[in-house]
Amino acid sequence: MSGGLALALADLREQDVLRLVKEGAEAGADPWALVGDLRRGISQVGDRFEKGEYFVSELIMAADIFKQVMVVLEPLLAGKREAPLGRVVMATVKGDIHDIGKNIVSMILSANGFEVFDLGVDVPPERIVSALQETGATVLGLSALLTVSFDPMKETIHALEQARLRDRVKVMIGGGPVNEKVRAYTGADGVGYDAQDAVALARQFLGVK
C-alpha cells in the first residue's frame, strides 16, 4: 500500500491515488503515514521534473492531486498535527498578478512538510511584513513574472529591514525573469528556479536535512 500510493502519485494516476487514500483511511491507517507516502510521491515527481521527464503541466497536476487528497485527510489529521519543518510566507509582489508558479511552489512546499501562508498576488510590502510578524515565519518566498516587479521585490526586502525582521527572515525569489543578478539587485538570499529548488532552499535556510 505504502509504495503503491507513492508510485500512483508519481505516475499522476489521480483516481488510484484517491482510491488508495480512501481505502487507507477506512482501514484505520495512520493519516500521517499516508501523508508521508504522498510526500514521497511528490518527491518522485520533482525528480522526474529535474530529469526532464515531466514538465510544468505535470507539476500542476501533481499539486492538484495532492490538494484533493488533503481534503480527504484533513479531518483525520485534526488533533494529530505534527510539527511543520518550518513556516514559509509566499507572495507574488505588488504590481504582478501571475500566480501559477507561486501556487505550484506553495503546494510542493506544503507537500514536503512546511506550513505555508500564501498571501496571493499583487501583495504590497506592508502586508508581507504584517504576515511575517503574525505567523512568525522565518522564510519568505517572493514570486514575479514581470521585470517591473524587481523593484517591488527590492522594496519588500527593504521593508523587512525597516521592520527589523531581516536578520531572522531568509528570502528566496523566483519567476521566469529572475536570476542571480536579480537576487543581488533585490538583496534576496537565494533564487529558486523551480519548485524543487524552493524546497531545497527552504530546507537550507532552516537547517533541515
Image: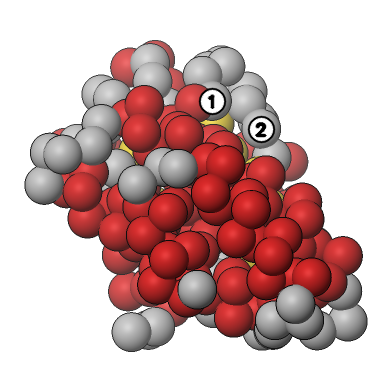
Tally of numbered discs = 2
Residue of label 2: 120
Residue type, numbered disc 1:
Asp
Q: Quadrant of residue 28?
A: bottom right
Residue type, numbered disc 2:
Gly
Residue 19: horizontal and vertical position, in percent?
64, 53
Up-down relation of residue 149 to residue 47 (above or below): above
Q: Is 105 or 148 nearer to us in this picture?
A: 105
Disc nearer the start of the sequence (1/2): 1
Residue 4: horizontal and vertical position, in percent?
43, 66
Q: Is 45 or 115 nearer to us in this picture?
A: 45
The answer to whether the residue labelled 1 contacts the one labelled 2, judged by CB atoms less than 8 Å apart, is yes
Q: Is residue 70 visible?
A: yes
- Give the alpha-carbon distance from disc 1 to disc 2, as whole Å: 7 Å
Residue at 79% in and 70% down: 26
Q: Which mark is residue 39?
A: none
Residue 1: horizontal and vertical position, in percent?
50, 73
Q: Is 131 or 194 nearer to us in this picture?
A: 194
Residue at 42% in and 54% down: 8
Q: Is 113 or 57 nearer to us in this picture?
A: 57
Image quadrant in which the C terminus is located: bottom left
- Dot 1 alpha-carbon crowd within 10 angstroms: few under 14, some 14 to 19, many 20 or more: some
Residue at 22% in and 55% down: 47
- Dot 2 alpha-carbon crowd within 10 angstroms: few under 14, some 14 to 19, many 20 or more: some
> Image check: 128 left or right of 64?
right
> Image check: 31 left or right of 189?
right
Residue of label 1: 99
